[in-house]
Amino acid sequence: MKPTKTCLSSLVVASSLLACVSQGKYDAAVSDVTRVRGQLQASEKLGADHRRESHTELAQVRQELAEANVALALAQQEVDVAGGIAIACGEALDESSTMNEGMSAELERRGKDVDQLVAAKAELAGSLERARSGLEELRGARAAAESQAAMFRDVAQRLGRMLDAGELNIVLRSGRMVLVLPSDVYFEPGKADIGRKGRKALSEVGHVLGSLPGRRFQVSGHTDADPTRVSGFASNWQLSSARALEVVGLLIHAGMQPASLSAAGYAEFDPVTANDSATNKARNRRIEIALQPNIDQMVDVSRVAGVATSNP
């Protein structure tokens, strides 16, 4: 604005100075001033237009810059959030790794525990099976023992007269029923012959034992420790064996099957008590008829039978 006013002032002054010039020169000067003024106005208008455009462009640039700043701030915020997420993810990853290691160790331990439980289960199953098998065996043994005990009681009842008369005794020895016949009742001292009374008693015994199907019996002779003198036998071996054979013959005569009988002589070498008195020697002089057990009946039946185990 100031340069333009200066130029106009200069033109006015110049016009004043040229007042004395010719009309033609004056008109020409006025025309020049008018032209210059028009040029100046056009220049001012063009400058104003440029300034408006510049202001508009500047405002647009400022708007774009503001938007760019906002976008930058948002991007920075997103970067910060992403960084925080990355840190949190790292920490979570570390924690997960630690947990994974702990879980792996726990799984390994539990795997071993499971193996131990499986082994223990198998062992328990085996023990249970053995217990069941043992229980079945015990049940079978008890049934056999009860059957045998019933038989013992029946034999004792049927031979009750002889028991009361002292002609025999019945004991349980090692789970076997043993009929004990005192030698002094059946034999003369040092002899193997049986008198009429003894024959009658053995006939009764043979009748009862022969009624037990499928059973085997051993007849054994026993003496005291005194040596034989006038018996006619070379030793107690021959005397005890001869007496056992004599009893076997009488039992067969009473109806027992020969295949169910056997004979043995033990001399003085299987005593039931010491040979230190006349009473004890009399106890050792005996004939025993032992019931041979079946394989499935080799059990202690004394408690089931209700008969006390004792020696004659």
Image: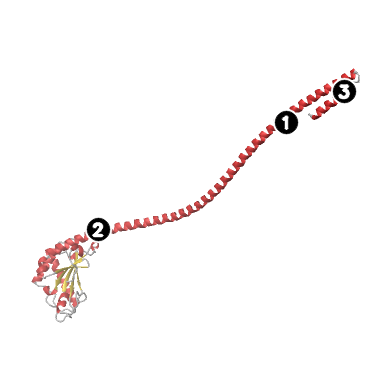
Amino acid on which the number 1 mark rests in the picture? Ser
In this rendering, the answer to whether 96 lies above or below 7 is below
Return the residue at label 2.
139
| Label 3: few (<14), some (14–19) or many (≥20) C-alpha neighbours in 10 Å | few
Residue at far bottom of view:
229
Near-viewer residue (31 or 190): 31
Q: Earlier in the sequence, mark 1 or mark 3?
A: 3
Q: Earlier in the sequence, mark 3 or mark 2?
A: 3
Amino acid on which the number 3 mark rests in the picture? Ser
Q: Could you tell me which secondary element the residue under label 2 belongs to? A: helix
In this rendering, the answer to whether 74 lies above or below 190 is above
Task: Choose top left, top right, bottom left or bottom right for residue 84.
Answer: top right
Q: Quadrant of the C terminus?
A: bottom left
Pair 1/3: label in front: 3
Residue 80 horizontal/vertical position (percent) = 59, 44
**Total numbered circles:** 3
Residue 118 horizontal/vertical position (percent) = 39, 55
Q: Earlier in the sequence, mark 2 or mark 1?
A: 1
At 14% from the left edge and 79% from the top edge, which residue is drawn? 278
Q: Could you tell me which secondary element the residue under label 1 belongs to? A: helix
Return the residue at label 3.
16
Q: CA distance from mark 2 to mark 1?
A: 119 Å
Residue at far top of view:
23
Determine which of the numbered discs, if any, sits on residue 295 in the image. Answer: none
At 68% from the left edge and 32% from the top edge, which residue is drawn? 59
Return the residue at label 1.
54
In this rendering, the answer to whether 150 lies above or below 74 is below
